[in-house]
Image: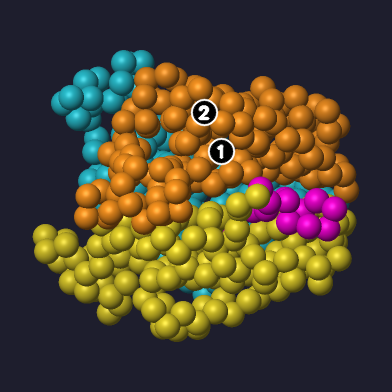
Chain colours: A orange, B cyan, C yellow
Amino acid sequence: MKSFRKVVTLHLSERMGFRNITPEVEAALRESGIQEGLCLVNPMHITASVFVNDDEAGLHADYARWLERLAPFSASTDPAKGGYLHNRTGEDNGDAHHKRQIMGRETVVAVTKGKLDLGTWERIFYGEFDGRREKRVLIKIIGE
Amino acid sequence: MKSFRKVVTLHLSERMGFRNITPEVEAALRESGIQEGLCLVNPMHITASVFVNDDEAGLHADYARWLERLAPFSASTDPAKGGYLHNRTGEDNGDAHHKRQIMGRETVVAVTKGKLDLGTWERIFYGEFDGRREKRVLIKIIGE
Amino acid sequence: MKSFRKVVTLHLSERMGFRNITPEVEAALRESGIQEGLCLVNPMHITASVFVNDDEAGLHADYARWLERLAPFSASTDPAKGGYLHNRTGEDNGDAHHKRQIMGRETVVAVTKGKLDLGTWERIFYGEFDGRREKRVLIKIIGE
């Protein structure tokens, strides 16, 4: 069995945003030389997601609006005012920990004949919910 | 290490629906001959989910009603009218891309002694949110 | 390839609650002797989640309040009164099957140099949505 690890660093200038990281994952897979196996991709942070969906800007704007509705930003620490108890830690990212749960933490993608075994429209995204700082994404591939 | 890949094709006649695909995954596992490992199951489409829950029709009706509340269908392209910018692409499935995020993309199930290592009530489902067309589900098993 | 399986039993006295199970997963990994691979952690039940986030009590209270808003508890079987058709089975846990979908079923964590390859703040949690009974969490590790 072979295993391969790579960390990709991202820095989004916006608080919430989505980046297609499929090319980075494909590059890691080529570097690994693995032909058959599984590829795990996850942020090493808890206010971000890795997920698979469409590379379409309108959809990403829809996601941002929808996530803001399901878990609105608030710097308050008072739930009665729409705030988050988590913000008592001195952070203002309570909402981001919730948005990340909706979009999920990680994805596992099959590796077949040396390629990511994705459907026609499947692309791997990094979803940022508390940006403007450096974040890391882990790519771990095991197989042969 | 062994690896095994199989694609299952589904065609649901309804827009939103749930199918128990545990028998198909069990059949793939038997075919693979793998005794110990991990089994990834994911739709190759971005308006569908693979998830694990209960094979109970009342629950599935509950899910459909709940998902419709969290991410309502609209063919409109105008967010102010409850529409989705994604529908500007000519699709009317903006809602389906959101429902899929709630239910998740994939599941990874342990393989132990040649069987899916599921709890008593765990069953694997295909969740369709933009049906009436042929869709593919990928089963990838690695192990020994 | 090596594989390792362990089941951890939990019993939460509250209906909804969150437990940091990272130490249990780390112990299983040490026991396995696996240095490089993937570690799957999932509840063997369908009204619970395994997820990765912050070990912070305020956040957990925020999650509980938020999940209650997205999928409120009701013992009713009548959707018109906020109930769940699933409760017709004699259960009153329709809400728990929904909360679990938001938080997800499983996590897959990379194993690198014999350790869980987690970011600084990443911790593995068991999320219970229908507690007061014994539940099992499966840890399956494959690698070398």
State which region is magenta.
C106-119
Q: Is residue C65 above or below residue A30?
A: below
Whether C115 is among the magenta residues is yes
**What residue do we see at 61% from left, 53% from top?**
C122
Q: Is residue B132 visible?
A: no
Residue furthest left in the image: C80
Q: Is residue C75 visible?
A: yes
Q: Quadrant of the C terminus of chain C?
A: bottom right
Chain of the residue under label 1: A
Nearest the camera: A22 or C85?
A22
Q: Amino acid at mark 2?
A: Arg
User: Which numbered disc flags the more N-terminal residue, 2 or 1?
Assistant: 1
- Using residue B128 as the reference point, say whether residue A123 is left or right of it: right
x%, y% of residue C88?
A: 24, 73
Mark 1 highlights which residue?
A: A50
Q: Is residue A25 above or below residue B127?
A: above
Helix, strand or loop at mark 1: strand
x%, y% of residue C24?
A: 67, 71
Nearest the camera: B82 or B50?
B82
x%, y% of residue C59?
A: 43, 57
* Front label number (2 vs 1): 2
**What residue do we see at 52% from left, 28% from top?**
A132
Helix, strand or loop at mark 2: loop
Mark 2 highlights which residue?
A: A132
x%, y% of residue A29?
A: 77, 31
State the image quarter where residue A110 is shown.
top right
